[in-house]
Image: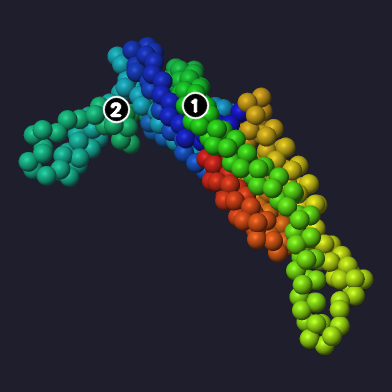
Amino acid sequence: MIRSMTGFGAATADAEGCRFSVEIKSVNNRFFKAIIRVPEEMSTLETELEAVVAKRLGRGSVMLLVRFVPGGSVAAVEVNPDAARTALTALLAALPAELRDRATVDLGALLAVPGVLRTDGVEALVEMARPVLLKLAAEACDRVLAMRTREGESISAELVRFGAAIRSALADISARAPQATTNYQDRLRTRMNALLAEVGATAAEQDLLREVAVFAERSDVAEEVARLTGHLKQFDQVIAASHAEPAGRTLDFLSQEMLREANTIASKSQDVEIARRVVEMKTAIDRIKEQAANAE
């Protein structure tokens, strides 16, 4: 199954009078990269939260944001009024004078300022928050995956179309290759007869056949066609709905290998029609590479 690397998910819960929320955003990245942002007093949970995300989202740049609004039941955590006053004063001072009277304060953001919450009893808060936040992180990941899956369906449809274009061009090349040799033989005979006619001679058939045999050997693309056909079979397996593993890196590798075979066919062949089909294949392969960069 193809999944996109772009997604968003959020989950919220109340526990012991406190409000917890987790938001997860993911975008393209060749590897997995996580940025975890939590309130200062819960910083010890960063590693555990990252582990939850890494287990579910195998690839992409992922940002997890935790918001926390304390309630009356969190007696172990106290607000430092002096630090809060200093932080609020600094924030208001940064605003233009005409905006200060209309400014509103985000309590969660204010409490996230280092030093506003006293650290006394933080361990008790962390122990209370741990199961809640880990559960919310898992729920948010599930919603990210649902969005990734929906977008992956569109990517998969495009990949199917590009694969069909490559397969069609390859079939034309395979059918055209013998004709290209025959055309070369006819052109060679015409050129040799024209040149030798000036001196009253004719081309020896064995010489002509020897040159044609050398050309046929040099321009034989049967091996490249066979390898590219094998890559297309594996490509079909990777983009199939039953394929459970992340497909992005595999598709990237396959597109590189397909491009290698297409370039070899182009370098071997001197036929205009084959060259045209190779251009069509390379265009489709480039599109596959672009979509692979979006796939998990």
- Furthest-right residue in this view: 206
Residue 61 x, y percent position in the rendering: 49, 40
Q: Which residue is mark 2?
A: 108
**What residue is shown at x 54% (from left), y 42% (from top)?**
291
* Residue 122 against residue 229 in the figure, above or below: above
* Residue 133 against residue 216 in the figure, above or below: above
Q: Which residue is mark 1?
A: 150
Disc 1 to disc 2, C-alpha distance:
33 Å
Give, as a three-letter code, the residue at label 2: Gly
Nearer to us in this view, 62 or 235:
235
Q: Earlier in the sequence, mark 1 or mark 2?
A: 2
Q: What kind of element bears circle 1?
A: helix
Of the 4 image quadrants, the one containing the N terminus is top right
**What residue is shown at x 74% (from left), y 49% (from top)?**
174
Residue 137 x, y percent position in the rendering: 48, 24
The image's mark for residue 69 is none
Q: Is residue 144 visible?
A: no
Of the 4 image quadrants, the one containing the C terminus is top right
Residue 115 x, y percent position in the rendering: 31, 35
Q: Is residue 88 visible?
A: yes
